[in-house]
Amino acid sequence: DDMVDHSDDELWAREPYRDKRLIVKTAKPFNAEIPPEYQIAHFDTPNELFYVRQHMPVPELEAGSHQLRVVLAPTQQVSSLSLAQLARLPRAIVRAALMCAGNRRSEMHQVKPVKGISWAGGAISNAVWSGVYLRDVLLHCGVDPNDTEGKHVILTGADIDATGQNFSTSIPLQLALDPNAQVILATHMNGQPLPPDHGCPLRAVVPGAPAVRSVKWLECITVSEEESSSHWHKKDYRSFNPSTTWEDADFESAPPVYSLPVTSAVCEPRHGDTVRVRDGHIEAKGYAYSGGGARVLRVDVSGDRGVSWRTATLQQDHAPPRTHYAWTLWTARLPVPAHCDQMEIWVKATDSNFNTQPENFDHIWNIRGILSNAYHKIKIRLQH
Amino acid sequence: DDMVDHSDDELWAREPYRDKRLIVKTAKPFNAEIPPEYQIAHFDTPNELFYVRQHMPVPELEAGSHQLRVVLAPTQQVSSLSLAQLARLPRAIVRAALMCAGNRRSEMHQVKPVKGISWAGGAISNAVWSGVYLRDVLLHCGVDPNDTEGKHVILTGADIDATGQNFSTSIPLQLALDPNAQVILATHMNGQPLPPDHGCPLRAVVPGAPAVRSVKWLECITVSEEESSSHWHKKDYRSFNPSTTWEDADFESAPPVYSLPVTSAVCEPRHGDTVRVRDGHIEAKGYAYSGGGARVLRVDVSGDRGVSWRTATLQQDHAPPRTHYAWTLWTARLPVPAHCDQMEIWVKATDSNFNTQPENFDHIWNIRGILSNAYHKIKIRLQH
Ligand SMILES: [Mo]
Ligand SMILES: [Mo]
């Protein structure tokens, strides 16, 4: 768990204003979901409704004076770049969903308890991010693209925990330099300067990766032989099989999560709703997403616990193969038997690698409750 | 089904010699699996043991006189390249498994019948392919890398069906040009000239894609606004949900399969074997694979129907993120309760996008029986 000093009110006195529609999971640090009805209301989530995941108090930074340090270990060659200097590099734009690795953890928790914020399906939103390519920044600072083997890019934010450690994680240098990966340093979100909750004035955006890699309030980039040594990097966001316990778990040898599996969720109706049947049908809507540049190819929806499946209509943006980073919104029409007064809705997505979701959580369960991508299943009542 | 004239013996008179250890599924055309014990015996499958998937009789081509035509539609600009001319381009090497999209179809068939060759798990093998990058060939012939949207590369082989049509399929031009995708035109397999069964003297290798895209006996490449119009491309290797019937299936609107999902199989022991227990354990071995450049990160094996999982030891080659195309071999040691005389072994793999396999075939079932990647489950007897 994050080392946060909750006794010091002063730390939290200058938190930004938050939209009242967000569903607050924890107040200090601030973690909040976007309500499902707002996920499907916009393809690009309005900035004020974008889910928020903080580890610490929000730092206050000035765009005008902000400097990004770039350190090349082992020589420790240091560059320092203002936002104005960064802006001289070619402009980069990527439409990408960001999703917390713990999105839908609450469903996995029901199978067997896991540690972490009890996210429902609202820890994912979609935006158009703009700034410059991390690749261009690294090449500008003298990184050798032919000497990448085993190297990492450590991303450090301005947010600080109670022990004085800055938030930090890392990604492989090869990923940072891969043109397909489209890793950017963003100054803008949906055409607006980044809001404080989303990293003002500069954040990394690592499309297709768990959002933890998209470090906010970015202060320093270090190219290193080592991964980040922070506990956020070393002791979290790693995956284990269902038999691994907190006592067994060897975090050092478990591979870090740098990409997210295919997932989907029903946003409308919601679990427990009463839905009016029209012309023998009801309509369901939601989102689907796959990390690593994969595109969602098909969303199948069942109203009879998997006996039959309907293919949903998809709303998605266009991108070349292996570089699809936005989410997909879907709508399906489901037939309802005449005398049926309740119904279970299941959704599963298939991506461009033809990977699909597991049917349930039993065999993907893990101590940290991440990568919780089984079929989303809800129950509703029907009104004829 | 392939249009093959079985009445004309002359067509089949010059088929190449085949290793007697291959497991023949159909003789004309020749389709044969590698036995599971040979899959795990070598990381790179010896050429004579590599599984064979033919649609028609094997053409006889001469390396010395072979010409590759490259046609750029709509201008119909044609280049013709000998193998000697191709060899002047930079040398390309890729270690890649090839897997038939129908591998493990026999297991899906048991749930509900599907059409196609009843492959067990032997329609996958691994090799080092060398030749030149398709990207370099296309750029050499004048393809504009900035005009790729909606274009396709049609790959046509010298094998001809009973209606006179050459085998042909296509891949998106953007995929063909993607350096990460490492699509090559291969002249060599594991350091030897391609054997007749594997496309002598020239074949495409599209790593991470279903093997049908890796066209053998390659004669012609056409860059076109259209996908291949062949029935192999238009009427096969497309995926549907389990509710789609042959009557319903709209092949034109279904997306072609250009990448394969994560899969795994137990090769030793085999279903029905009697296995001697040593020190309270048995050992299991097999392969795992994921398409689209994903790497297998973890293989979990269960001896108690998923109640507990052991992580297997992996043998795999090294490759940068998103460009891992070889298979993975695995070994696991499973504990056996003292008085147990039979056991079920389950295996599932997790790839670098943290996608994993579905538990069973029910909800991935499809009319053509492709993408059959549920957990592999076998039953054995134990001898203490
Ligand atoms: Mo996260
Ligand atoms: Mo195939």
Image: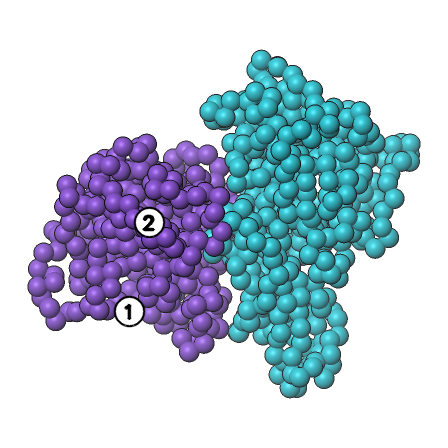
Chain colours: A cyan, B purple
Badge 2 crowding class, 10 Å Cα cut-off, few under 14, some 14 to 19, many 20 or more, is few
On the image, the x and y values in percent for residue A90 come to 62, 33
Q: Where is residue B34 in the image (x, y as percent from the top left)?
A: 25, 51
Residue wearing tag 2: B77
Disc 1 sits on a residue from what chain?
A: B
In this image, B269 relative to B348: left or right?
left
Pointer 1 local density, CA inside 10 Å: few below 14, some 14–19, many at least 20: few
Tell me how many marks there are: 2
The residue that appears at 53% across and 74% down in the rendered structure is A308
Is circle 1 on the same chain as circle 2?
yes
Foreground of the two, A299 or A253: A299
Question: In the figure, is residue B124 to the left or right of B23?
Answer: right
Which residue: 21% across, 36% down? B84
Question: In this picture, is A331 found above or below A145?
Answer: below
**Image coordinates for residue A244, horizontal then vertical, percent:** 56, 43
Instruction: Write the residue at 42% across / 78% down.
Output: B247
Mark sitting earlier along the chain (1/2): 1
- Return the residue at label 1: B1
